[in-house]
Amino acid sequence: MSIMGTRVVRTEDPLFLSRGATYTDDLIDERLTGALHLTLVRSPLAHAAVTAVGVDEARSAPGVVDVVTGADVDLAPPLLFGGANKAMRRPWLATDRVRFVGEPVAAVLTEESYQGQDAADLVEVDYDPLPALIDLKESLAGENLLFPEAGTNVAVAFDKDPLDDAMFDGCEVVVTREIVNQRLAAASLETRAAAAVWGEDGRLTLWCSTQNAQSTRDEVAGWLGVDAAQVHVITPDVGGGFGAKIGADPEFALAAWLAKRTGRPVRWSETRSENMTGMVQGRAQVQTVTIGGSRDGDVQAYRLDVLADAGAYPRLGSFLPYFTRMMATGVYEIPKVASRARSVVTTTTSTGAYRGAGRPEATAAIERAMDLFAAEIGMDPVEVRRRNLVPADAFPYKTPGGATYDTGEYAQALDKVLAAADYPALRAEQAARRERGDAVQLGIGVSVFVEITGGGAFSEDASVEVHPDGTVTVLTGTSPHGQGHATAWAMLASEHLGIDIGRITVTHGDTDLIPRGAGTMGSRSLQTGGVAVYQAAGELVELAKQRAADLLEADVDDLEVADGAVTVRGTDRGVTLAQLAERERLQVDSTFDSGAPSFPFGAHVAVVEVDVESGKAVVDRIVTVDDAGPVLNPLLCEGQRHGGIAQGISQALLEEVVYDADGNPLTATFADYAFPSAAELPSFTLVDMATPTHLNPIGAKGIGEAGTIGATPAVQSAVVDAVSHLGVRHIDMPTSPLRIWEAINAAAQSDSDARISAGSQA
């Protein structure tokens, strides 16, 4: 019986729930005995010239072993994203200029961690303030340059030529709107941390909280100017990442360099406030959407112009508009499409990947555009969507953005979610409340989405070994931080080997044991890393059958593997895999390469109640179809869907990283950043649907980001829909009570002004 679709409880959880996780800051390792503790002196200003750094008083503070400034560091400043403007390098410690609040200026090393901040407070830095740069359009104008030597604030540009309005010729209706996809903090459970020690053999051992040990090894080695073989990266338990922990952070290499300088191990762990200003943040796009078509609902042209915030030093976030452009048309078949994107630097925290990484931004734009178009022509937004969906017989479907969608049943997903939500009943309830003039109005938001998963990292490695005691070790290049790989990969190995998952150990995140791997991000794990494990276990079975054939004097074709043994079909003659392993090592390395990404899809219906007197919005229900192909473990799949939906709702209603005009972060703690709890979220109704891909043998696509991509525009649309009868067409996220209240009152004022104008003309 196939293990696919089996609801297996996570094997990771008993240890997490009893002893607790072992994060980087919790490590006890003899190699870290006598480690120094790193505290960073951070800039309190968003933009300033650094005129002097005084460290004498700090050096004499209790427990201080060393105080280091930028002038002491002999490493070349890194370009944190290779495709960015080459002048936009980040210094290890600021020397001439700081460009965001929280930028490291000096490093303090102390015997005990509690001594670090007291000593850091004694470092005297003289700043000459410079104008902050927060507004993206101001940055694009280039009058205030963050990197004068670059001559521009544009970090990365995709099709920077002016856009041509001629594409909308012939459209009966054209709607344009600027919308904001706000900046978000990843806010992972565990903040960033690292521990570094150099061995007598000259090799660096680096423990760190990252989503990919192998790329971290390569980046850190490059920054330090050593061969990658000289760096051994180990990831202990990782408390979440959501994309913000992809690869290495400069602080990892700095800790390693300081360990080399002092000849002692160095440990670093940031506070939550440091994390909220230091770890890369997500989204941060201003989008201008223009959509045109006929009054009977056919969309004929769509244009997306993206201005993205790279933050002070361009990182992966500056590249993500590439995915936004690629996925611009979403699930819709639109004849004429154009897009442009530019990433600019600002005096803020750098941006990176955040759950969905460029794809949620694309979905939010096109779904908002479809709603605006539907409102303009007076058509139900569901019907506008239905008329323009890519038909099921069009796959594989090549999009104007250059993507090739593997499979899709978009209309079916929409029909399923509408039926589960009882869409006609919701509209009837909405009409009744409007007729009565209720203070609490009902809003219904619908989104249909497609996303790219596994993009850019199609290949993954795995190793499966059966030991003489009957246990199994799986080595994987993926790197879990909450996804449940220990359970899922054991299930996949067990499927072929017939060995109980309790006897299968999954090991990851050690570059000496697993030198190759692409980590976990972009919803890639099951369709690459999981399939690699599945493939390796299958190959091990074939190897075992070949060896058993000689031992049992039988033909390979007459052998079968079940319950951890190779037997001659129809007889009791056999040999266990453990016995074969005792005779000769029984192990297989395998690489799986899908050759292309997959494109999961789905549809969401959000039901929101809005108090029109206070502006408060509450999500009453959310019903979702998230089709990621056949499901391996429903428990893990539902957990991923729940987490994604929660983050999608949270962006629509609550979360936003805010800076004032001087570049000061106003949301640097959880007291200020609207982080959701269970109290802000409804129960979720999950509707099943599975459309397999042909790109891997189990037909699986990615599920980790789907909920986030679909939920955000559905909830935003629902909020706008709840007050649309009052004349509101759009509310930017987060749709806070204040923004909703202001939109209602602005619409009322506009209506009043129109009546006065009409009366005066009469």
Image: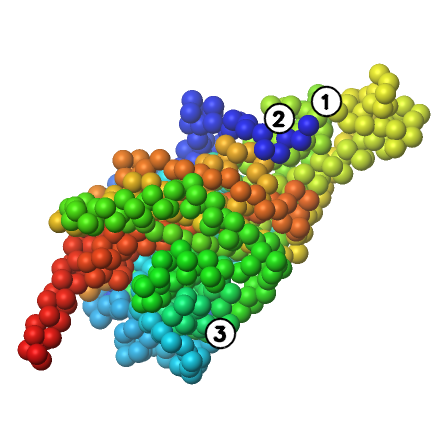
Q: Which of marks 1 and 3 is nearer the N terminus?
A: 3
In terms of secondary structure, where does tag 1 sit? loop
Residue 36 found in image quarter: top left
Q: Where is residue 265 in the image (x, y as percent from the top left)?
A: 45, 42
Residue nearest the observer in this picture, 253 or 52: 253
Task: Residue at 42%, 22% (x, y): give it.
Answer: 18
Q: Is residue 50 above or below residue 123?
A: below
Q: What residue is pinned by disc 3?
A: 336
Q: Which mark is residue 494?
A: none
Where disc 3 sits, the SS reads: strand
Observer-nearest of 287 and 345: 287
Q: Name the residue under label 2.
A: 501
Query: Which one is in front, 409 or 287?
Result: 409
CA gap, disc 3 and disc 2? 52 Å
Residue 323 drawn at (x, y percent): 48, 62
Q: Which of marks 1 and 2 is nearer the N terminus?
A: 2
Foreground tag (3 vs 2): 3
**Does 147 sit above or below residue 728?**
below
Q: Are discs 1 and 2 less than 8 Å apart at CB?
A: no
Residue type marked 3: Lys
Identify the residue shown where x is 52% and y is 34%.
634
Query: In the displayed structure, does residue 528 sit left or right of residue 140?
Result: right
**Which of labels 1 and 3 is toward the front?**
3
Amino acid at dot 2? Ile
Residue at disc 2, secondary structure: helix
How far across and down, in percent of the image, does residue 730 sit?
A: 27, 61
* Residue under label 1: 563
